[in-house]
Amino acid sequence: MSGSGPSAAGRSGAEYRIEDLAHASGATVRTIRAYQDRGLLPTPERRGRANVYRDTHLSRLGQIADLLDRGYTLASIKELLEAWDTGRGLGGVLGLVAEVHGPWTDERADRITRDELNVKFGGTHDEQAVAEAVDLGVLERIPGRQDEFLVPSPQELAVAVELYAAGVPLSAISGHLRELRGQVEQIASRFLEFTTEHVFARYLGHRPPTDADAAEAASMVRRLRPLAQQTVDAELARAMRTFATRHLEHHLSAEEPFAPGPASPGPVPVALPPATIAAVHSLVGPEHASAFVTAATEREVQARTLDALASSHLNAEQVDQIG
């Protein structure tokens, strides 16, 4: 998108009646008139009883459509276009918009046929599961291709395949993804709030930002883009290590040490009284209960071992004195 505002709108070039402009731009006549009423389009030239539009109007309609596709409201678009009309330019702002709307991952979309999808999920033909996957965006339907889907994230589909192979039902996988997506969206929202408050506020403090500020903000987006994923990866690894250890302790702490012999066919589960469990929960919290029980058991075993050693040592000394 280039130009220098309305001063560059010459009187030569193509001319359009409103119906022709609608056909060339893809907008409806009603939409063009609505944009004109809101001040989003320059005033057309009046010629007799008809309005005459030019290439500048066609270009402006393209700008509006592009910004709408990127999620801007008509009010925000009007501010941006007013800045453009006063000569401040849109280059930096659109560069920032392109940077934010660019891919946030190196992963590339793929395609998969219905037969290939069935094979990956054990040969099952589950229309409900496919509908859930489409609703979640794991699969996207391709117009005119009933037996083929677009896969925006092959990695996400691969995870679902592995979980299904491990015995997780498809309904549980889709439910887990919905829950996980909500939590991840909260993390993304918080990261954006954090970076906006501490980094981007100085660039975006005025609306619309200058070209220089927008260009610098776009550069900052490129620098910060990988930080969100790196932080989540590191914290997820730490949390998985911590909670996997706790889960293992929880299952192991409910078992007595195995004592080989004919009367001991295997580990014997130990059930703690409800009052004891409630007391432990009250003392350290439910999330720390298994670790607390494990530590308390280990301390008791160590104490009894030391007592036995001390008693044995004392008895040995008494025997020596008698002797």
Image (tube, helix red, strand yellow):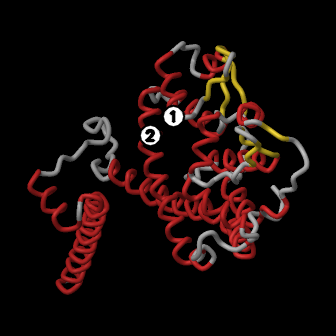
Cα separation between marks 2 and 1: 8 Å
Residue sticking out furthest to the right = 12
Give neighbour class at mark 1: few <14, some 14-19, many 20+ (Cα, 10 Å). some
Q: Quadrant of the C terminus?
A: bottom left
| Element assignment for label 1 | helix
Question: Are the residues at dot 2 and dot 1 in contact (C-beta closer than 8 Å)?
Answer: yes
Q: Residue at x 34, y 50 (%)?
A: 252
Q: Tag 2: residue type?
A: Arg
Q: Residue at x 75, y 61 (%)?
A: 95
| 246, 87: nearer the viewer | 87
Residue position for label 2: 178
**Would residue 101 be found to the left or right of residue 246 on screen?**
right
Q: Could you tell me residue 315's position as x and y percent?
A: 20, 77
Residue position for label 1: 136
Q: Tag 1: residue type?
A: Leu
Q: Residue at x 73, y 46 (%)?
A: 46
Q: Quadrant of the N terminus?
A: bottom right
Q: Could you tell me residue 128's position as x and y percent?
A: 46, 19
